[in-house]
Image: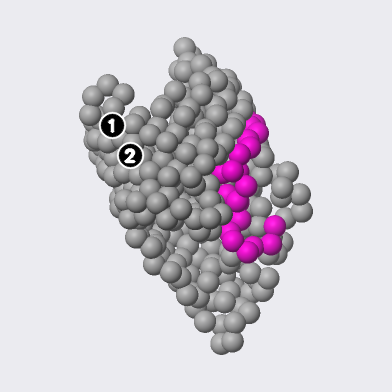
Amino acid sequence: MRTWLDDEPEMEPLLPLHNDIGLAVKPVLSAGMSRLWWAVLFWAWLAPVYAAEPSPTPGDTPTVTAESGLWHYGAYLDVGYVVNFNFPENHLWRNRGTAVRHNEFAPNMALVYVRKDVNESSRWGMELGVQGGYDSERFAFLQGEREVSGADTLRHIHRANVSYLAPVGRGLTITAGLFNSLIGYESLYAKDNVNYTRSWIADNTPYMMFGINAKYPVNDRLTVAAFVINRYLHLAYTNDQPSYGGQWSYKASPHLTLTQTMYGGPDQTNTAFEFWRFYANHIVEWKGDRLTLAASYDIGTENIADRPGNPRAFVMGGNVVARWQVTGPWAVAVRPEFY
C-alpha cells in the first residue's frame, strides 16, 4: 500500500533472466506478482505542495511561470514494509539496490532539497540536496564493484549542480555537477514512480550522473542532449577516463513521446576502445488524461578484458508500465518486465 502525501559489477558475461510483474493501486496496493510480495508505504508530508520535485519526462524542458516562482524546496520521508513470502532469513532481496529490506519496517529514503529553476530573466540555476536511508546505500554502484574514495559519504548527496540557460537560439541549458540521469524512465525516489519497487533495468542503470550535460530544444517537438560524465555509475571506480552519451526526444503527438539515450565509455580497468561499454535506452510513452502507457527496452554490450578470449557480454531488459486513474486519488497500475 502507498499513502501519497508528498509532491517529489561490471557486466557479467552470463546474465540471469528474470521475469517480474509489479502491481500498484495508488494509494493502496503495490505488488510484484511473480515473487508474490507486496509493499506497504507510509509517506510523511514534510513539504508544501509547491515544493514538489516530480520525475521529469525525458526530453521535457521545464516551463516556469512568474506565479510559481523559480525557487523550490522540500523534504520527505519514505518508510516501507515489503512482505516477501519466501521469508529470507537475512531480510534481503537478492542483490537489488532499492527496496531491498523485506519483512520489516525499513526507512528507505529521507531527503531534503532546494532547487532554483532557470528562465530567460534568471539564467542561473542550481540543485542541492542530502539524503539517507537504505535506498541511498547501493544506488551508485553495482554488486562487487570498487567504490570511489569517500563513497559512504558521497552517497548521501541527492543532487549538487549548477545550470545556465545560454541565450543561444531557442535556449541551450547547460548543467554541471551531480544531476538526474538521462538514462531510464524510473526514478531512485519511489514516490515518483508508478510502482513502489523499481524494475531490474532501473536498478542496473544510473539514477544519477556526475559531469556535464547540455540540452537544446530544436523545435516544439524535438529536444536533443549530450553529456560527458565520469563513468557509468558515478560512485564506482574502475579508471579515470570519462564516458560520453547523447539523447533525442521527439513528441510525435500531444500524447506520444519517443526517447532514445545512447551511452559509451570505458568501464573496466583496461580502457582500450575494444573494451568500452555501449548501452542504449529506448522509451515510448503515451500519456492521456487518465491512462499512461510506457514501454522501455534496454540493451548493452562490452568485451570482458580480464576473461580468457575476451568474451562479449550482453545485457538486455525491458518493461511495460500501464497506469489507469480510476477516480480521485485512486489509480491502478501494472508493470510486467524481463531482464
Q: Which residue is at a point 38% across and 43% down the rendered structure image? A: 38
Residue pointed to by mark 2: 24
Q: Nearer the viewer, residue 205 or 272?
A: 205
Q: Amino acid at mark 2?
A: Ala
Q: Which residues are magenta?
A: 125-147
User: Is residue 158 a member of the stretch shown in magenta?
Assistant: no
Left or right: residue 279 versus residue 19 is right
Q: Secondary structure at mark 1?
A: strand
| Above or below, 247 relative to 316 | above
Residue furthest out toward the right? 149
Q: Which residue is at a point 34% across and 31% down the rendered structure image? A: 28
Residue pointed to by mark 1: 331
Confirm or deny contact between disc 2 and disc 1 (CB under 8 A).
yes
Q: Secondary structure at mark 2?
A: strand
What percent of the width, then of the height, locates residue 131? Answer: 63, 35
- In which quadrant of the rendered image does the C terminus lie? bottom left
Q: Amino acid at mark 1?
A: Ala
Q: Is any part of residue 38 visible from this angle?
A: yes
What percent of the width, then of the height, locates residue 97? Answer: 54, 51
Q: CA distance from mark 2 to mark 1?
A: 8 Å
Left or right: residue 278 versus residue 146 is left
Point out which mark residue 175 bears. Answer: none
